[in-house]
Image (cartoon, grey):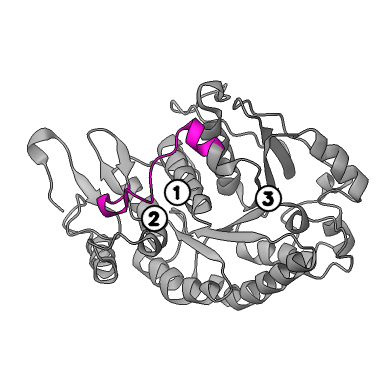
Amino acid sequence: MAHARASGVTRVRARGVRATTLGDDDDGFRAAAQQQLNLTSSVDSSREHCIYHIGDVVFDELDRTWRYPSNCVAHLHKFDATLAREALSGKSLFFLGNSVNRRLLYAIAHILGGSNATYNRSPVAAEIVQDIFSHTIFEIGVNASGHCSRQYRCSTAAFGINPKVRSISESSLKMFNCQNKSAWVETRKLFDSAIALGFLFTSTPVLPVAVRFLEIWANLDDVSFAASPVDNYDILVVQILILDAKEESYFEKLYQTLKKLMRRRKALSRPVRFILWGSPHNLESELHTTTIIEIIQQKLRPRMRDIGVTVLDVTFATAHASALTLGQHQKGSLHHFMDFTRLMLADMLINTINTL
């Protein structure tokens, strides 16, 4: 892909690049780019190919934006509020992860909001996409006009639990959502005709706690109605954050648990879809970007494909956006992206959901 230096434009294709704007000493990024180029066909415009490569984006430094590969314009596109509401209409999404996943939830709400989006009241470095971190677990609704509700909780007793505690009892975990069907129905009335977005904070690292939640929800006895997000949302968005090689040890347990949960929902005659997304660029990761990409592409994605679980790989895109200073982290944060990357990730997720 050519660079247009004279006009001030540098177009770089994340993962499927022929060259990058990074320094000559950044061999890691160049290696990752070449590795992905070997796996990606630039002329393949099939739906399956484009879905697989939603994380492959083109950055334009002059316009400070991203675009999807030109060969995928028939399948992938940027979502405005109207298109996003159409794509997510009637759906409920639950986000399981750390605060990066919560900020992704609010970026989704921002796109859905359009002209009625709720803006950040205390901008940090010109950020406008809101993020509210009052509760460990909550649900918000975005109505047909794009207005975002406050955070709602179905059960108040569970919110005193320290989310960093690994040995949370099963009885406590059952309380993390509505404790009975009538409580759930009453809460759902608040979101009539709205797109429901729920969240549960796992702490960091993400996978040990996320897998623990999913395991317990998979083993609930009552399949007629259970007090867990897995039983009551259409799509679960699970964050995959790979900080070191130990994260791999949770992949098989995650696979078996998701397989069991999908059977559970089938018994309820309400299929559920899972989207695993990651690994977002993190400044404290012990692994190089190339290694993380290999882990996702060669170990996580093929295994999950066997049971119909979608994996959205954003590893190189988020790292590259950061290297280009388009997708910066908040000042003083190792995890939190600013608006550019938050909205890019939200758009990738909506594209992913739109293909399910």
Give the amino acid at mark 3: Phe
**Mark seen at residue 348:** 1
Q: Is residue 226 above or below residue 122?
A: below
Give the amino acid at mark 1: Met
Which structural element holds mark 1? helix
Q: Are marks 2 and 3 in contact (CB under 8 Å)?
A: no
Q: Nearer the viewer, residue 72 or 118?
A: 72
Residue at 69% x, 68% y: name it: 262
Q: What whole-number distance in Å separates the C-alpha atoms at marks 1 and 2?
A: 7 Å
User: Which one is earlier in the sequence, the residue at label 2 or at label 3?
Assistant: 2
Q: Are marks 1 and 2 in contact (CB under 8 Å)?
A: yes
**Mark seen at residue 201:** 3
Q: Position of residue 236 (x, y in %)?
A: 64, 55
Residue at 43% x, 54% y: name it: 281
Q: For the residue carrying disc 1, how many other residues have a C-alpha within 10 Å: few (<14), some (14-19), or many (20+)? A: many
**Residue ID for mark 2:** 55
Q: For the residue carrying disc 3, how many other residues have a C-alpha within 10 Å: few (<14), some (14-19), or many (20+)? A: many
Q: Is residue 15 above or below residue 141?
A: below
Residue at 76% x, 53% y: name it: 232
Give the amino acid at mark 2: Gly
Residue reaching furthest to the left: 6
Which of discs 2 and 3 lies nearer the camera? The answer is: 2
**Mark seen at residue 294:** none
Which of discs 3 and 1 lies nearer the camera? The answer is: 1
**Residue 325 at least partly seen:** no
Instruction: Give the magenta part as a residue range.
Output: 68-85
User: Which one is earlier in the sequence, the residue at label 1 or at label 2?
Assistant: 2
Q: Nearer the viewer, residue 103 or 352?
A: 352
Q: Position of residue 117 (x, y in %)?
A: 55, 25
